[in-house]
Amino acid sequence: MAEFDPHILEEKAVPPPEGFSRRARVGSLADYRKLYQRASEDPEGFWSEQAELLHWFKAPTQTLAWNPPHARWFHDGTLNVSYNCLDRHVQLHPQRTAMHWEAEDGQRVTLSYTDLYEKTCRCANALKKLGVKSGDCVTIYMPLIPQLAVAMLACARIGAMHSVVFGGFSAPALSDRMLDAKSRVLITADGGYRRGRIIPLKDTADTAVGKCPQVEKVLVVRRTGEKIKWHEGRDVWWHELVDAASSLAPAEPFPAEHPFFVLYTSGTTGKPKGVLHTSAGYLLQTMWSTRLVFDLREEDVYWCTADIGWVTGHSYLVYGPLACGATLVMYEGAPDFPVKDRFWQIVDRYKVSIFYSSATAVRAFMSWGRELLEKHDLSSLRLLGTVGEPINPAAWKWYHAIVGKGRCPIVDTWWQTETGSILISPLPGATPAKAGSATLPLPGVAARVLRMDGSEVVPGETGYLVIEQPWPSMMRTIYGDDERFKRDYWSRIPGKYFTGDAAQCDKDGYIWVLGRVDDVIKVAGHRLSSMEIESALVSHAAVAEAAVVARPDEIKGEAIVVFCTLRMGFSADEQLRAQISDHVANVIGTIARPAEVRFADLLPKTRSGKIMRRLLRELAHKGSVSGDTTTLEDFSSIEKLAREVGHDEE
Ligand code: WTA
């Protein structure tokens, strides 16, 4: 399956700015290579040295216990995650700003490390009063407000797991996740704001809790002040319980492998999987990578624009930066509300020096024009980052030239919910960047691009991205489904971690991630499953059969296209089209709303009855199907790979 992409082989490297390299933690490619080699020769020695970054109640004497595919890292050590993110900074610099929060309506709050610590302690005590114990899983369904970070840190403080569900998910998506996690406590808010509209989170939460008999308590933050339904005995106001609780809550030690959080993500079936991360390995590698990849310093103002409902928000808005004692910015709203230069106002106001966003955001900025940036002083920026989907070279170059004014290195960071932290990325002072490539694996990361038979690809050939050795922040299992963990990640190329991504490697060893080989769709960097959307579709009374594919989208990377056949008695009209779209948004969330719904008399199928998604992809992409549809050779390399992996039809 040798597919050669000349663009990948020809892209010129952009060296890191000299001034940046001079003061960076890793200042040259040669130093990176030395570090990489040191880590691959003795991974355990390497990671046990890095482990000194954390505060341990009992320092580990063991580094890795590897019983493939199950890893335990630092397992005889004990620590407390929230102590690492708060207490130790409070001891050193109590008044340092931990967080600047800005609401969509312009309201602003600044919290010092002491403020954040005290709020976390109060919340920890409140959760205990609600009966939350170590090992329980608390579901959190909130807007992007400081209480969300407080709630997470409070769970960590008392050894409870959290499962944060993105505030854009609907009631059925929330209840599925609460049921799977067996949460007895839900933390939510009366509502949130999105582009000036109130999102009625509590209403949605009420509907979801109605399907979850195990939920005993719902802790509610008052955010909008709108009138909400109140369930006496079950619902508790945050401002009554948390604000009245004691601000002292000693951080207890927990074992390194104590379960930390579950984060549900979409996979290749209709059922989302609960990716389980544990304490020390996750925290260590997120903290370590934050320092290395973002070159984070005490004087930086760091802004990751992700929502905490996704893994980027967990690792690089909350845990990585706070473990480093950084000053971060959190912004509640959308980039274009009420004005399209909202982000640049924020950069200017707080003098943001590190800006980490998505490729979709960059493409949107590009389409809105450079004039919007010119109104603001962006000279505080010194490093830019991107994540979540491949960034096309044109968008990369615009980001570099227009946002970074050619002065700022760009870190194109590749990773996944499952990997916990960034695994492939340039080191900003060391690695010459190539527009569109995540470049080289971080030290300690054995990333390879392989053929299905386990052999290495040649430069320019498309293969599968795999990780050959365990790493500290790797997922430990799928919550409640270890078999699926083994099957999905460790058996496709036996003994190696299978990422689900197609990639190429160029002659310099740079990795170019091309996209997924399974049924995962990335809309604006948000991870969705075509199977999940299909099951939502067939739950609509009019839909007989449905197939969901992605087509390229200029801004969002991918867009959802639905093909469906209708049951007898329903007519294919505009009204039904809108109804079906609304239905998907109601079942999953507005992020899953299809860009297009197409009606068909029949869906194309193979002789064995499987839907030919490849044909539909081409149809969605080009509007028609070319080539010989009986041999079906005329498709892109990723689709061929998908077939080989067996995720797809035929
Ligand atoms: C994709 C997001 C290209 C990839 C942190 C991966 C990327 C999936 C990049 C994980 C990148 C992430 N370049 N593709 N820099 N970063 N991806 O779990 O397909 O939401 O498998 O984690 O996003 O998505 P997830």
Image (spheres, rainbow, N blue to C red):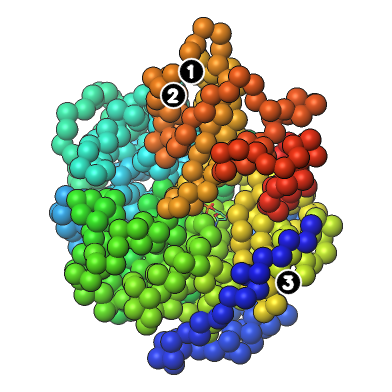
Crowd tier of the residue under label 2, counting other residues whose Cα lies within 10 Å: few below 14, some 14–19, many 20 or above: some
Which residue: 53% across, 77% down?
A: 433
239 left or right, relative to 275: left
| Cβ atoms at labels 2 and 1 below 8 Å apart | yes
| Cβ atoms at labels 1 and 3 below 8 Å apart | no
The residue tagged 2 is 577
Residue 571 percent coordinates (x, y):
48, 13
Instruction: Classify mark 1: helix, strand or loop.
Output: loop
- Give me the disc on residue 572: 1
Which residue: 21% across, 27% down?
A: 228
Of callouts 2 and 1, the N-terminal one: 1
Instruction: Classify mark 2: helix, strand or loop.
Output: helix
Quadrant location of the N terminus in the rendered image? bottom right
Of callouts 1 and 3, the N-terminal one: 3
User: Is residue 263 visible from the viewing direction of this image?
Assistant: no
Q: Residue furthest top?
A: 569
- Name which residue type carries label 3: Pro
| Cβ atoms at labels 2 and 3 below 8 Å apart | no
Residue 573 percent coordinates (x, y):
44, 19
Disc 1 versus disc 3: distance between alpha carbons? 48 Å
- Name which residue type carries label 2: Arg
- Name which residue type carries label 1: Ala
Disc 2 versus disc 3: distance between alpha carbons? 45 Å
Q: Quadrant of ligand 1?
A: bottom right
The residue tagged 3 is 459
Quarter holding residue 444: bottom right
